[in-house]
Image: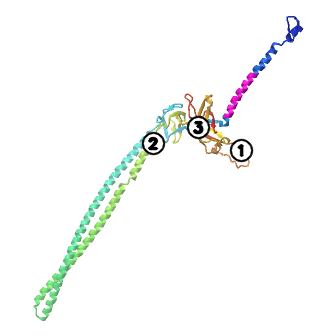
């Protein structure tokens, strides 16, 4: 077959009777079949796209989503309350820890000495208080005894004064009688009715009565002076009682003992601070110090990541334009980048009262002349209601959240 026949054969087909007609080639017969197949495939793709597109549209109508979100946690910084050197570190990075577990031991030599010194000062303060109290009580007892003696002296002096005063009227009457007898005798002697020796006897009797009267007055004065002196002694004894009671109250003042007790308590607490325990259940996320390092009070030694319900949550930063219908309690779908195909569920726990920019070191000044409006983002805290076994959520993981707002 020559070239022309070959070309003719490619365009047509020879019938058995020797005639030739325009018969379709293989490619021409396959063309309509391919178009049908592609049309069917296109229809299927369109149906699938339409189905998922409508589904996504319906989902997006009632959800607000963002990929500016991450796993967050209430991490705990384990710090020292005192300045001391680390003696032992009992855990390492990534270790699991339990609440109350001993994590760090600091050198406690100085703290033990401080406790012993504070204990000695406290014991001394107690001993001094007991001694001064006993002395004060003894002083009060002595002053009270002196007061009792002085009061007895007052009673005795008062009795003596009463007795002396009782003797004065009799002595006065005796003196008056002796003086009257003397005057009458003197008158009779002058008339010669009585002998002069009788006058001498009356004069002697009068002198004796005068002496007795003076003695009675002197006894009254002595008794009065004794009473005054006894009353002064009572006043002095009362002052001594007051002074002794003041000293007793001062010795019983608990301030010195309380101060020593406070110092002892502080020393014991500092000793206890040399042992640092885990405040939560979780894992050691980061170790920031090593054995032998001297740490200051407040310096972070370990960072603990909690492991428990409510301790792990999502922080999602939504645009302010998405916040109009969002409120606490709304359900949330959570997609974690690390676990594609798995949907976690949660709900809105809280909404931050300010935008992220508010907490920046240099907040935006919207009133400046070169102001450019930038959509702000509001942090939203989201719970994780259904943690998936074998799929732990670690702080810092990237997630996408969709809040159902309608």
In three-dimensional space, the C-alpha distance between marks 1 and 2, rounded to whole angstroms, equals: 54 Å
Determine which residue is flagged by label 2.
270
- In the image, residue 10 sits, relative to residue 225, either above or below, namely above
Identify the residue shown where x is 24% and y is 75%. Answer: 221
Determine which residue is flagged by label 1.
373
- In the image, residue 83 sits, relative to residue 154, either above or below, namely above
Q: Is residue 214 left or right of residue 287?
A: left
Question: In this view of the protein, which residue sits in the foreground, 204 or 306?
Answer: 306
Question: In this view of the protein, which residue sits in the foreground, 186 or 75?
Answer: 75
Q: Is residue 114 left or right of residue 349?
A: left
Question: Of the residues tagged 3 and 1, which is closer to the observer?
Answer: 3
Question: Of the residues tagged 3 and 2, which is closer to the observer?
Answer: 3
Determine which residue is flagged by label 3.
347
The reply to whether residue 245 is in sight is yes
Magenta-tinted stretch: 39-58
Secondary structure at badge 3 equals strand
Q: Position of residue 211 (x, y in %)?
A: 18, 80
Question: In this view of the protein, which residue sits in the foreground, 336 or 111?
Answer: 336
């Amino acid at each position: 077959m020559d070239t022309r026949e070959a070309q003719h054969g490619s365009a047509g087909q020879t019938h058995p009777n020797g005639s030739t007609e325009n018969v379709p080639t293989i490619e021409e017969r396959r063309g309509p079949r391919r178009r049908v197949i592609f049309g069917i495939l296109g229809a299927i793709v369109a149906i699938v796209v339409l189905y998922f597109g409508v589904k996504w549209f319906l989902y997006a109508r009632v959800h607000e989503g963002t990929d500016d979100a991450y796993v967050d946690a209430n991490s705990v910084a384990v710090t020292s309350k005192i300045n001391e050197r680390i003696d032992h570190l009992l855990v390492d990075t990534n270790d699991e820890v339990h609440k109350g577990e001993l994590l760090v031991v600091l050198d406690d030599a100085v703290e033990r000495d401080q406790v012993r010194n504070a204990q000695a000062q406290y014991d001394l303060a107690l001993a001094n208080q007991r001694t001064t109290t006993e002395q004060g009580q003894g002083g009060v007892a002595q002053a009270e005894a002196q007061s009792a003696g002085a009061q007895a002296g007052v009673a005795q002096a008062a009795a003596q004064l009463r007795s002396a005063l009782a003797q004065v009227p009799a002595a006065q009457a005796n003196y008056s009688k002796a003086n009257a007898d003397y005057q009458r005798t003197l008158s009779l002697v002058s008339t010669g009715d009585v002998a002069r020796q009788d006058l001498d006897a009356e004069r002697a009797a009068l002198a004796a009565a005068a002496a007795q009267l003076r003695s009675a007055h002197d006894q009254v004065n002595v008794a009065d002076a004794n009473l005054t002196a006894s009353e002064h002694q009572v006043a002095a004894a009362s002052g001594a009682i007051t002074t002794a009671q003041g000293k007793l109250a001062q010795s019983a003042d608990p301030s010195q003992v309380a101060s020593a007790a406070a110092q002892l308590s502080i020393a014991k607490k500092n000793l206890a601070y040399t042992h640092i325990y885990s405040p939560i259940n979780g894992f050691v996320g980061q170790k920031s110090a090593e054995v032998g390092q001297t740490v200051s009070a407040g310096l972070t030694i370990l960072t603990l990541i909690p492991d428990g319900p409510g301790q792990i949550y999502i922080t999602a930063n939504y645009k302010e334009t998405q916040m109009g219908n969002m409120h606490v309690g709304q359900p949330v779908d959570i997609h974690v980048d690390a676990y594609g195909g798995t949907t976690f569920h949660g709900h809105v726990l809280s909404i931050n009262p300010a935008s992220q920019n508010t907490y920046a070191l240099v907040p935006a000044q919207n009133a400046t002349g070169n102001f450019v409006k930038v959509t702000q983002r509001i942090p939203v805290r989201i719970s994780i209601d259904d943690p998936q076994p074998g799929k732990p959520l670690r702080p810092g993981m990237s997630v996408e959240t969709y809040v159902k707002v309608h």
